[in-house]
Image (spheres, grey):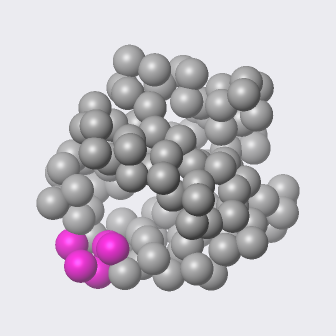
Amino acid sequence: MIQYLDDLPSNIVGFKATGEITELDFADTVMPKVKTLIERTDKLNYLLVLETSVKNFTIGAWMKDAIMGIKHLTKWNRAAIVSDVDAIRTFTDFFSYLMPGEFKGFEHKDLQEAIDWVAGETD
């Protein structure tokens, strides 16, 4: 399930992923919030707190995630993935070389630092 995090700075859209993640999670929760933020700010500052294994994402969820990335390719500004899995953080950091915008991985203990970074309050 993906839950919208509504207690974040207004220039961020953020989510927490727990359990199984499906295509409907992206279609019903993520995509509408991303669209609203881009319409309001013309850029995408994105936070994802992973409290589940990436193995729990269905194929449909991965497809919707990829579509979102491509659809808003020029709007990505900053994206943080919060996970205690080293490989996920490393992959997220590497993504900055492939996509427009900045991508950075954070550990769960550094959640506030991730929020501040995505909001542009720190480098």
Screen quadrant of the N terminus? bottom left
Count of numbered badges drawn on the protein: 0
Name the quadrant containing residue 73. bottom right
> Does 90 sit left or right of 87 as displayed?
right
Magenta span of residues? 58-62
Q: Position of residue 114 (x, y in %)?
A: 55, 30
Specify the farthest residue to the right. 41
Name the quadrant containing residue 27. bottom left
- Residue at position x 62%, y 81% in the image: 71
Name the quadrant containing residue 11. top right
- Residue at position x 55%, y 72% in the image: 69
- In the image, residue 19 above or below residue 110: below
Q: Is residue 38 magenta?
A: no
Chief SS of the magenta region: helix
> Does 10 sit left or right of 86 as displayed?
right
Q: Position of residue 20 (x, y in %)?
A: 18, 59
- Nearest the viewer among 14 and 88 is 88
- Residue at position x 78%, y 59% in the image: 43
